[in-house]
Amino acid sequence: MELHYLELFNSVAEYESFKKASEVLHISQPALSIQIKKLEEQIGLKLFNKIGNKICLSENGLMLYEYTRKIMSIVCELEHNISTTKNFIGGTINIGGSNTPGTYILPELIGLFKKSYPNTKINLNIANTSEIAHGINNGTLDFAINGGNLEYSSYIYSEKLIEEKLVLVASPLHPLAKKTKVTAEELATVEFVVHKTDSQLYTYYKKFIEDIGIPEKISMYLGNIDAIKRAVCSNLGIALIPYSAVRLDIRYSQLKELKVTGINSTYPYSLIYNKNKSLSVTSKKFIELIHETIEEYKYKKASRENKNKQ
């Protein structure tokens, strides 16, 4: 028995009229009569009796009508639940973030998102760029913000969100902290605190020293931004760090930004997700928030730059 036939029968039985049912179903009355005849032939039972110009349900028709009313009620309930589920923002999403965006960008966005959608549970996985890419590859993460210029497989969607300024920071006690501008010759005399060599930030540190033409002098390798900041605060070396990670430290004079003549280093952040994994409505809504926040940041940055030019 096809659901379509049962739906047609249910309408005719409800109105006890082929004419009325055909109007409601938007099909011709002859076509509806043919479909009901096919259903009767399929189940081997006569469903309607004709008395004069009117029709009424036969005993078999009454029995089938009891079932089709239940079936149609369940179908309506299912359609409603599917529609509700399609638009429901909640449940659990698993987000990834490399060290800087995971520690300094995503927590704030998660806080904003949960204010609007408190029924959402969000798991944030913070790791290095390669580990985050692996989580997207194997489907354990729904989407992520990753730092650097990692090459991804063909089935990972990658969208560059923004280029963030990399800043050179030192302890306020460091001899270079007293200078308005720092030269390459001066930087050649000091040691750096850097990320481990398998990180994207280490790659950008290498590019930085190559661009200004100084040798590699490293006091220590550390595994995360916070550890690097602590080492710098303790005057164990200087470091090249994304601005979002040291913004408050600079504002409250825990770290000092060193201005380097003629150097403008930036660090990219990208949104990534697996093309073969379907994004939930909740994930899509969070990605909308990411885009809105980035656009707002770009607008404010452009406004500040235009103001400085005037």
Image: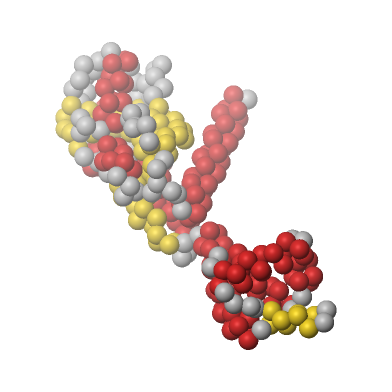
Percent position of residue 199, x then y: 25, 33
Is 36 on the left-hand or right-hand side of 85?
A: right
Q: Quadrant of residue 144?
A: top left
Residue name at image x 72 percent, y 67 percent: 33
Percent position of residue 162, x then y: 46, 33
Outermost residue toward the bottom in this view: 59
Percent position of residue 272, x then y: 40, 39
Percent position of residue 86, x then y: 53, 59
Front-lying residue, 136 or 43:
43
One can see residue 246 in this view: no
Residue name at image x 80 percent, y 80 percent: 54
Q: How many marks?
A: 0
One can see residue 281 in this view: yes
Is 296 on the left-hand or right-hand side of 159?
A: right
Residue name at image x 45 percent, y 34 percent: 159
Outermost residue toward the right in this view: 53
**Which quadrant, please, contains the C terminus?**
top right
Q: Quadrant of residue 202?
A: top left
Is 65 on the left-hand or right-hand side of 256?
A: right
Compared to residue 262, the image places residue 27 above or below, namely below
